[in-house]
Image: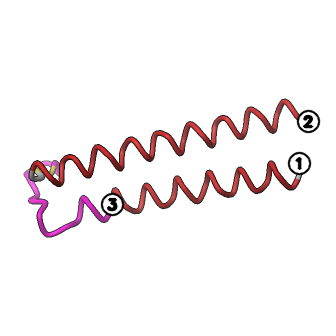
Amino acid sequence: MTRATSRRRAAAALATLAAATALVLTGCSPGASAKPGGAQSVSGADEATVKDMQQKLDDAESAAAQADSDAAQNN
């Protein structure tokens, strides 16, 4: 594994971790109210934030998958 590939993987992993952490924090915010069964209800603004963070998480996972694919092709 090259140094550049290693850095891309680390960056993708860090981005995924940051996005997942933000999703957890958003779900645990005072504006979110718990429903029976573990589901949560959020206001419109919070819902937009959750959707934005989900998109960022999806993008980070896609970038990580692409980095893995690139690394496999380089080896």
Task: Give the image quarter of residue 23.
Answer: bottom left
Q: Position of residue 4 (x, y in %)?
A: 82, 52
* In the rendered image, the vertical position of residue 67 relative to residue 23, given as above or below: above
Q: Amino acid at mark 3?
A: Val
| Marks 1 and 2 close (CB-CB < 8 Å) | yes
For the C terminus, the quadrant is: top right
Residue 46 within the magenta-colored segment of the rendering: no
Q: Is 5 drawn above or below residue 27 in the view shown?
A: above
Callout 3–callout 1 Cβ contact below 8 Å: no
What residue sits right under mark 2 in the picture? 75
Q: Earlier in the sequence, mark 1 or mark 2?
A: 1
User: Percent position (x, y) of residue 1?
Assistant: 88, 48
Number of the label disc, if any, that sits on residue 24: 3
Secondary structure found at label 3? helix
Decide: few, some or many residues near mark 2? Use Cα within 10 Å; few <14, some 14-19, many ≥20: few
> Are the residues tagged 2 and 3 within 8 Å (C-beta)?
no
Left or right of 73: which side holds 23? left
Q: CA distance from mark 3 to mark 1?
A: 32 Å
Q: Position of residue 24 (x, y in %)?
A: 33, 60
Q: Tag on residue 58?
A: none
Residue 1's disc number: 1
Residue visible at 72% across and 51% down in the picture: 8
- The reply, left or right, for residue 53 in relation to residue 70 is left
Q: Which residues are magenta?
A: 24-39
